[in-house]
Image (cartoon, rainbow, N blue to C red):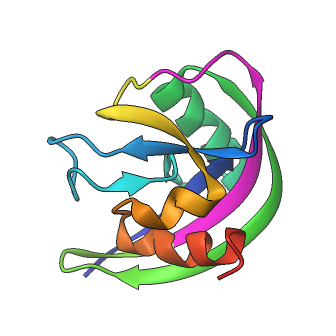
């Protein structure tokens, strides 16, 4: 079974809201919310991969901060090794270049969204339960 290493950014604004991205119809797991990010390329470290992916997907520049967690999730078609990090936007404003939409969501409301299964551990940790 195919295995991929993926990094994701948990970006919080000044109002303590988290940036959530809705997967488009053309992506795997369409209409699921996720933390933006993507696959780590060969020879790339997590920080560089996350900065590149956010620039490609959201057209902004981030600073990668502390790691939140690492999880392995088995989907029907692949195994995902997901690494999530707290991040801060340092230049630009996020635009949905690949996702159906972006939304700033209060921490307390994250659990009301239909997230991709691999992201659920991160949600549990950042919402303290």
Q: Quadrant of the C terminus?
A: bottom right
127 or 72: nearer the eye? 127
**102 within the magenta span:** no
Percent across and percent down for residue 3 are 37, 74
Q: Residue furthest top?
A: 92
User: For residue 98, what is the image quadrant?
Assistant: top left
**93 within the magenta span:** yes
Q: Is residue 6 visible?
A: no
Q: Is residue 70 left or right of residue 14?
A: left
Q: Is residue 128 left or right of residue 63?
A: left
118 or 20: nearer the eye? 20
Q: Quadrant of the N terminus?
A: bottom left
Percent across and percent down for residue 35 are 51, 52
Q: Residue furthest left?
A: 25
86 or 14: nearer the eye? 14
The residue lying at 41 percent from left, 26 percent from top is 96
89 or 18: nearer the eye? 18
């Amino acid at each position: 079974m195919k295995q991929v290493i993926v990094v994701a950014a948990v970006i919080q604004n000044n109002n303590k809201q988290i940036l959530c991205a809705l997967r488009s119809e053309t992506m795997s797991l369409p209409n699921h919310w996720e933390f933006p990010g993507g696959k780590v390329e060969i020879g790339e470290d997590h920080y560089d991969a996350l900065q590149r992916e956010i620039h490609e997907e959201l057209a902004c520049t981030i600073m990668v901060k502390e790691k939140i967690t690492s999880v392995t999730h088995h989907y029907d078609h692949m195994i995902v090794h997901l690494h999530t990090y707290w991040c801060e936007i340092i230049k630009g404003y996020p635009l949905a270049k690949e996702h159906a939409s972006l939304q700033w969501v209060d921490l307390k409301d994250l659990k009301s969204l239909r997230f991709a299964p691999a992201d659920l551990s991160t949600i549990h940790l950042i919402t303290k339960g």
